[in-house]
Amino acid sequence: MTATAPAPATARARATAFLPRLALVLAVLLATLFTAAAPATAHAALTASDPTDGAVVATAPAQVTLSFSEQVAMGDDSIRVLDPQGRRVDTGELRDMCSGNTIRYGTALHSGLPNGTYTVAWQAVSADSHPISGAFTFSIGAPSATEVSLPTTTAGGGPVGIAYGIARYAAYAGFTVLVGGAAFILLCWRRGAAERPLQKLVVRAWVTLTAATLAMLVLRTPYTGSGRFADAFDLDGLRAVLETKTGASLVSRLLLLGAAALFVAVLFGVYARRLEDAGTGEKTEEQAGEKTEGRAGQEAGDTNDLTFGLAIGGAVVSGGIAATWALSEHASTGIQPGLAMPADILHMMAVATWLGGLCALLVALHKVPGIERSAVRRFSRVAFVSVVVLAVTGVYQAWRQTGTWSALTGTEYGRLLLLKVALVAVLLAVASMSRKWTARLAAAPAALEEADAKVGAQVAAADDVSRETSSVAVPADPERAAQLARQRAALESAREKRVRDADPDRAGLRRSVLAEAAIAVVLLVVTTVLTSTEPGRTVEQEAARGSAATAVPDRAVKITLPFDTGGPNGKGSVRLELDPGRVGANTLHLWADTGDGQPFDLPEIKVAFTLPAKDIGPLPVVPDQAAPGHWTASGVQLPLAGEWRIDVTVRSSDIDQTTVQKTVKIG
């Protein structure tokens, strides 16, 4: 819930005026960021390859190279080249060809490869920890049939991917409840440190986060590699994972969770006992006057000092745990990582304080009798601050990962982001209902104090009955003992129900907080999916690169080349038409004309295509004569876009021939 505590009319008016201004400022900021965004990458993608997908080369290349949009982690087996029969033809040695901003890796091929279609399969780990993979084909000489089928599954999929994804969800949930539950106790309701339900909630969250982190560390090798669960026990693979950025982050998280265990032990041990002793001391002082005022003040000061120390220590540890995500995922790559990582840490802390605190409040309202109204009001203020931080950092993250309005509405990442915003809006709407219940709690203090007194009397009476029951000797008959145990359980359940139903306002608040918690669970799931989805910026960049690579002219390439073979009647011209004049298969037409425009029936004509920039060619073409002065050839393959040189060799007699050339732009 995000409501502030009820305030005088002036304060409420100021708050009412402030919220629309805040919304307007955030909307203007969002619009400015999206309209002024420049292209950037935040997720690794294959940007180029040599040979390219579908290329037909005249001779076997010496190597295959892949270029990426950002740094990736690759091993010796990351690039595999297979011949038409499925046999590997690469040397298995990875070549690091990176230079400056160019990220390129390759592998050498065996010499003497025969003509046919070859398959390149590759797999890598992006700098934001997510595995990426792909496959494509190229041909030597001419395309052929191949027994190799392109993989239909992507890296990080299958059962291992599902298990790893579950661990990621559990890790986010554990972090949220661990941080939010501890923050709720220290900031809103200190007495909650001694309450068993809240203790169980926080401890279980710590166990969940620890177990999920261990599972992610063990599954990292099969998740980014083979996809087989058996590889989880590969010690060499685990050692390799520990040398990566993601492995170091997971190990750091485990070490920080050790510090978090110490924090939880102090919070529910020394701190809880000190609070209980302080409460007992107050009663004793009232009844017997044994404690002095100075001693009571000293105990209160010690408790406040311990609270401050736990708050600082908890903030440092939770910030460190949040940093293990920021340092290894989307925030650590792309534009402005120095600003993005602190923003990501603040975002995660705000989400945990709000949603995790919401879970703690729900448990307190449901399980703990007599939670103070002041605790609810304090959480309302803490939640409001968390939402403000969440909104500011969320707007920045949205701009950084999408950048344009088209990426926000036209990509999977953008649509998930819009869904997350919609869920936050629904959550805030439900929180407004909680605000009404909070206002009712504060509007009738006299009635609530009377209800609290009644609840206290019921609790005391139930405790007396429970003590009397427990003081009775347990009968030797096991059936009788079991019957007494069921009676005591029924008594305890009835007592809890009476406590919950004694205050209808608290019951209404509990129901609205339960609705908030349910929406928060869905919101957490969407957020986790977002962290594993390719950002909208990168999707649009890949689409732009793809469209640039496959751009074709509106019409066929048509050129006219005059020639002179040097012999008698050796002058004329060749009209060449390449249709459609693009990368891939083309149809070639040639017409030869004499000087007076008549068809020139040449004894021989040949064509060759060369791409000097890529050292491709010459690719020879011998057209067939279709009619006097007309030759044609189909299936002329041009593997790459670029400035192609067309050489036309014409022979007018047994000894008279010449070659003319022209450079044209293909693609």
Image (cartoon, helix red, strand yellow):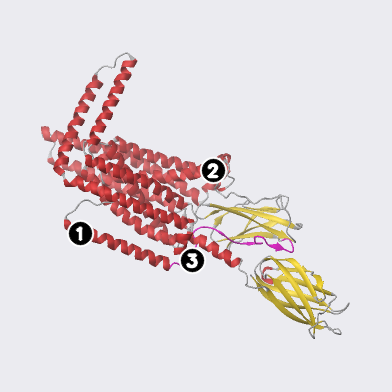
| Within-10-Å neighbours for mark 1: few <14, some 14–19, many 20+ | few
Q: CA distance from mark 1 to mark 3?
A: 43 Å
Q: Amino acid at mark 2?
A: Val
Please give the label number shown on residue 39. 3
Residue 464 highlighted magenta (yes or no): no
Give the left or right position of residue 321, taking residue 92 as reference.
Answer: left
Q: Which residue is mark 1?
A: 13
Q: Earlier in the sequence, mark 3 or mark 2?
A: 3
Q: Amino acid at mark 1?
A: Ala
Measuring from the top left, give residue 623's x and y in whole percent.
79, 70
Residue drawn at x 23%, y 59% is 16
Q: Which residue is mark 2?
A: 160
Residue drawn at x 44%, y 67% is 37
Residue drawn at x 15%, y 38% is 450
Measuring from the top left, give residue 416's x and y in whole percent.
44, 54
Q: CA distance from mark 2 to mark 1?
A: 55 Å
Q: CA distance from mark 3 to mark 2?
A: 34 Å
Give the left or right position of residue 329, taking residue 660 as reference.
Answer: left
